[in-house]
Amino acid sequence: MDPTTKATKTFEVKARDAQGKARAGVLHTPHGSVETPVFMPVATLGSVKALSQEDLADLKVRAILANSYHLYLRPGCPEIVSAGGLHKFMDYDGMILTDSGGFQVMSLSDLREVDDHGVSFRSHIDGSSHRLTPAGVIEVQAALASDCWTTLDVCPAYPCSKDEAASALRRTMAWTDQSVPAVRRFRDQGASSLFFPILQGSVFPELRQQAAEHLSGVPHDGVCIGGLSVGEPKDLTWSTLAAVSGMPPDEKPRYLMGVGTPEDVWEAVAAGADMMDCVFPTRVARNGQVFTRTGRYNISNAPSRGNFSPLDPNCSCFVCRRYTRAYLRHLFSSRELAVYRFLTYHNLSFMLKVMEEIRQAVAEGRFAQAKEDFLAKLVSTGLSGPSSRRPG
């Protein structure tokens, strides 16, 4: 058996939506099983901003995303290796998926040079010179001992021409091929981490098909769908995702990178996504934005003054059980540090509850109606979420 494949089944589909592409399943990882669809909070530097690991445990967060690029630069792989890996370094026992850092490197347009074998760049922290190769990115993730490894990729901006997208895809596919020997080597040495190559192609179906056909020849445990949620219109996001979800193999989990608003996770699951991540719930919390069943509002706005009701009367998290809008508005206006934890905790609690409802709706065969009901209650405020691969 190819050492990049797993002896046991990595992903099991437990239920499907009869009317569409939504499905519920279980992803088996070295640090436990994760029910899907799943939303993964972003812990860029080994920490979900404003929350402790005790908070994550209380929220029952079983999967997070950390960033290889940032951890490679600070504190550096040697220190994390000395700690026994990223799980022990941050004291987290759930699944950790590591982003390859390709998005961050590509965004440093004035600090990097790209060639067919990798990227040379200067650190955004101290200007020091570094080199990332496809194999080197796998080596970094092996040093971190994360549960799911991703590949170095080129993420084209939107809008881009088909030629530009095709060029980015060719390099991404070549880099994926260059990653496989490193994955094999670490598997031979006993690593059990899952391998999730990144599928690119922008919004061009024929390029996505080419990428999918290429991945069919690459041993892998799941697929990262990159190049979406980078500024394209939402309807184009979902139509592209639906097209990709119709491409084989069906038995692999599909990780949609960079999606994480309450309304978008319903649309993503409807289009076939199994895994998602985004900094949006935590980032907007630090800006005072609160998630509720009827839309988002800002805690600093005047209606919260003298309002002694909870953030969301339908929420049972400890913040809503204990604190009032008036008190939290006071903390936020006073820049008291505790408020960032309270609002972040609430928003993640809300997101995780939504994902639980989605899984249950798929399992009970009522996903389409549940989605319609949820979106009908949600009052859009025109806010859109950022890419998950920016520091959260």
Image: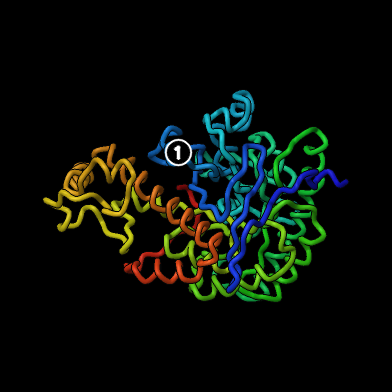
Question: Which residue shows up at 62% across the image and 39% down it?
Answer: 32
Instruction: Out of 312 and 301, give the one closest to the viewer.
Output: 312
Most extreme residue toward the top is 82
Which residue matches tag 1?
Answer: 56
Image position of 361 (left or right of 77): left
Q: Nearer the viewer, residue 103 or 8?
A: 8
Q: How far across and how far down the image is residue 271, in percent?
A: 57, 69
Q: Position of residue 325 (x, y in %)?
A: 20, 49
The residue lying toward the viewer, choosing from 386 and 19, is 19
Task: Tell me if 209 is positioned left or right of 374 in this view.
Answer: right
Residue extending farthest to the left is 306
Label tally: 1
Could one spot residue 389 in this view of the protein? no
- Asked where in the image residue 156 lies, by quadrant, the reply is bottom right
Q: Residues within 10 Å of mark 1 (few under 14, many from 20)?
A: many
* Residue positioned 23% across, 49% down in the render: 310
Residue 117 in percent (x, y) is at 75, 52
Q: Amino acid at mark 1?
A: Leu
Rendered view: 341 above or below 254: above
For mark 1, give the secondary structure. helix
Q: Is residue 329 visible?
A: yes
Q: Residue at x 79, y 53 (%)?
A: 219
